[in-house]
Image (spheres, grey):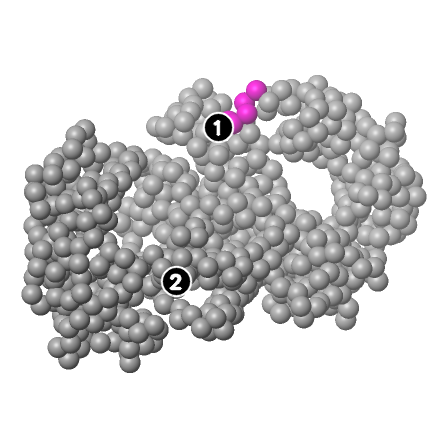
Amino acid sequence: MVKEFTFTYEEKKKMAAQTAEILTEEIGLKGDAIQAVHLIPEIDEGKLSMADIEAQYGSSVVRILQGLDRIHQLYQKNPVVESENFRNLLLSFAEDMRVILIMIADRVNLMRTLLKSNKEGDPQGIFVGGKAFMEAVSLEAAYLYAPLAHKLGLYKLKSELEDLSLKYLEHDAYYHIREKLSETKASRDAYIQRFIGPVEEKVKAAGIKCHIKGRTKSIHSIWQKMQKQKCPFEGVYDLFAIRIIIDCPEGQEKMQCWQAYSIVTDMYQPNPKRLRDWLSVPKSNGYESLHITVLGPEQKWVEVQIRTERMDEIAERGVAAHWRYKGVKGESGLDEWLTNIRSMLEHSDGLEAMDQFKMDLYEDEVFVFTPRGDLLKFPVGATVLDFAYHIHSKVGNQCTGGRINGRVVPIRYQLKSGDQVEVLTSANQKPRQEWLNIVKTSRAKSKIRLALKETQVKDGLFAKEMLERKFKNRKIEMEDSIMFHVVKKMGFKEVSDFYKQIADGILDTNDVIEKYLELKEGEKVITGDNVARSASEFELDESKVAGLNVPMNDDVLIIDRNLKGIDYQLARCCSPIYGDSVFGFVTINGGIKIHRTDCPNAPELRRRYGYRIVKAKWSGKGSSQYSITLRVIGTDDIGIVNNLTSIISKDEKLVLRSINIDSHDGLFSGNLEVMIDDTSRLETLIKKLRVVKGVKQVERI
């Protein structure tokens, strides 16, 4: 946001009066809005409260002032246009149409004041920010206020804002074009008169009361053409437009406009590709006019705009003129547009919403027909798929293409004004990710995203059921703890992605089962081999622990009703050690797996297989050691790894089996695998590691 500067009370009153004049004379706004503008200095100076104003002027004036106050607070909060502030700004705008108009008029007044201050040789004047301030004001005028004025039909003010902002942002280009226009003014005015004379004579001879005028296009418009066409000033052929303004009763408007069109195109060769008919279907902002480009004298292309006095006032004053002409087409379109803008801003990311908003502001529309003859409006570039989702979500999800004017077209076909569209569907069709790149409207995008999520959930459930059936057919019990490791080992971060690939046929269920069996076989019994045996039969195989100071496992587990000597394994998902609170889980082959009571898989095991849970507890500590993994996070200081490992090496009853450290952005994180006796020694180790300088977090995983 542009940073505000301090004005005196008199300066504020003067600025408010100038803004009110623009609202009245150039926009046509009266009543409560004008009263609200005049009261702004009184509120700023604390001369009046909102309660006083409501008592004297009514709630409508208060509502406008509250909307303006919200904008004022945003300006004070942050001098930069951030996405969240932009969102709030637009939501405040959409509360009351008059707030938009006042903000536009205020920005026009500010830009004019800057221009006047600059002309007087004092570019800073009362604006302490000087050049930087003027550039910031100009940027906002260019990307926010001018597009808003355009959408609301305030074309004169839109052009003025664009020209003034161009003057500050592209100083050299602005003065270059202005000088060129001055040099060619005499010849251009003479040509306009040569064109207007014969046309005016014939139109009036046909009994049409009108006046005709020529206008030079704005400097900003010419600059845009030069940029787009990559040509110099001399390469822009349509520097001006002729406007025929007809004075007639409202009931004869279309007839007389088309009659004037016929006269002009009889006199000069028209370019059919340049015909713009906003008489039959006005723009959403209420703009009505007939535009045609013809080949005039000396083989020069000339744009001719044909409209009535009423249409011209709406074009000049935009939305405010609707309050003078009841029932004008397009008024409801404005309300619909503002509703769509609010909906989009509430459900989109800030930056994405900003881009979509700016695009929608300048977007022209196409108008197409349903098979029943209903007229629907879409932005330029909308496709058959946009049309399908506009009809219904189900129609969009099953869309395979369309029939345009009897011709079959794909879903990517871009709609053109006048098309009659029929949607072709198939029950076997499903939404795809790439559809998001095909559609244009935010409505279609949101419906596709929702459908993709629902499809993913359904496919995931189907894939899971299919996998469980395969396991059952091969008489293999699917254990969730092992399945969790299978998913990770196969490179999936999310379980949903794993099941999606099964559903899509990318992942073979047989490969999954083989991986499952491989990991299951890898679940060693605590005795150190793959054959589950009683703890009482345990004998140390020295060859298998050569080089490691790992004592014999002689700890005792009592399972269920004081039973000893039962086959068991320690579950790898939670790696229980002596001293942990544990429980037993009976596997399909009759063996028992020992889990910690706080194991991440414990809630699911209890919920689904409660009947296979048995009690277990440690009894009689021997000299066994267990493998545990600690997760350590801290500041990446020199020597911190040595400090960690030295704590472990100093304790002769601890064995460091592996260490894996990662460093990023000044932080390190890593896993330490340690052989340890029991939970009490584990707690002591964790306490020692936590006091190492730079360590922020130590936890068992």
Quarter occupied by the N terminus: top left
Q: Is residue 288 visible?
A: no
Q: Say whether marks 1 and 2 touch (CB < 8 Å).
A: no
> Residue beneath label 1, please?
116
Measuring 84% from the left and 38% from the top, which residue is drawn there?
294
* Element marked by disc 2: helix
Q: Position of residue 228 (x, y in %)?
A: 67, 31
Q: Within the magenta stretch, is there residue 222? A: no
As for residue 169 lying within the magenta part, the answer is yes
What residue is at 75 percent from the left and 61 percent from the top?
A: 402
| Magenta stretch: helix, strand or loop mostly | helix
Left or right position of 405 against 603: right
Badge number at residue 207: none
Say which amino acid is labelled 1. Answer: Lys
Viewer-nearest residue: 660 or 549: 549
Front position in the image: 510 or 78: 510
Q: Earlier in the sequence, mark 1 or mark 2?
A: 1
Q: Position of residue 84 (x, y in %)?
A: 39, 48
- Judging by the rendered image, the residue that carries numbered circle 2 is 483
Give the residues in magenta: 168-172
Give the CA distance from mark 1 to mark 2.
Answer: 75 Å
**Relative vertical location of residue 174 with respect to residue 475 in this rendering, above or below:** above
Determine the residue positioned at 30% across, 60% down.
Answer: 530
Secondary element under disc 1, as helix, strand or loop, is: helix
**Residue type, mark 2 in image:** Met
Q: Is residue 300 left or right of residue 168?
A: right
